[in-house]
Image: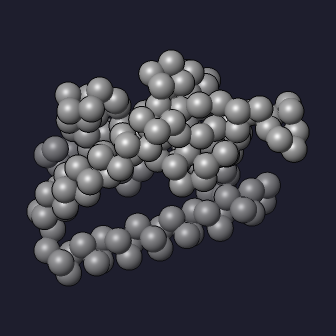
Amino acid sequence: MPASDHPILEYLSFRLDRLSELSKAAGSQYYENEFGVTVRDLRVLRLVALEPGLTLGRLIELSLLEKTLVSKLVSALVRQGLLRRQIGEVDARQINLFLSAEGESMVKRTYERGNTLEKDFLATLTEAELKIFNRCIDKLTDTLERRAKNAGSDDPGSAKPKRAA
């Protein structure tokens, strides 16, 4: 995108959103064609693989997606046979989420391909640039997470991050 006289195009949050959307669009197109799932489907599946038995509330917290979207994704993945719901053993009001055998296979296969896709995407950066890029992302993320912890202060930058739709 060419330089602009419009400040919004220069804000870091806008630039990161743009990069994220372009990356998700490219990934979704690939994953939909190859595996029949979207990047958001994979986010849900991979988080359930990370924490088998997690609740919907925990999944919403980890995924940074809207509650209604996560609920719809979970229902669709259950219908596709990739996820299964189980009534909580400790609290019957809670529903725990687990991968099915097919879901486990999907996660494994998509991680293998995803690692290749990410490596290809990041190949545009030198090794030194990638180290600096990762260090900068970690530093900025840590700063914003600390601010989110302190939400409620007078600092307008301390508000909790909004979930993506």
Up-down relation of residue 144 to residue 21 (above or below): below
Name which residue lies at 55% across and 45% down.
48
The answer to whether residue 29 is left or right of residue 40 is: left
Rendered-image quadrant of the N terminus: top left
Q: Is residue 57 above or below residue 165?
A: below
Query: Which residue lies at the image location 70% right of the left edge and 33% below the top edge?
Result: 86
Q: Position of residue 135 (x, y in %)?
A: 38, 76
Q: Is residue 144 visible?
A: yes
Q: In the displayed structure, does residue 61 sit left or right of residue 131?
A: right
- The residue furthest bottom is 128
Position of 115 compared to 67: left or right?
left
Residue lying at the far front of the rendered structure: 101
Q: Can see residue 43?
A: no
Residue 11 locus on image (x, y percent): 37, 51
Quadrant of residue 144 within the rendered picture: bottom right
Q: Nearer the viewer, residue 101 or 119?
A: 101
Write the residue at 21% across / 44% down: 4
Return the residue nearer the eye: 159 or 97.
97
- Where residue 99 sits: x, y (%)? 53, 40
Count of numbered labels shown in the rendering:
0
The residue at 56%/69% (across/down) is: 143
Q: Nearer the viewer, residue 6 or 160?
A: 160
**What colour scheme has been applied to the protein in the rendered image?**
one colour
* Residue 106 image position (x, y, % from top left): 36, 40
Task: Identify whether 39 is placed above or below 80.
Answer: below
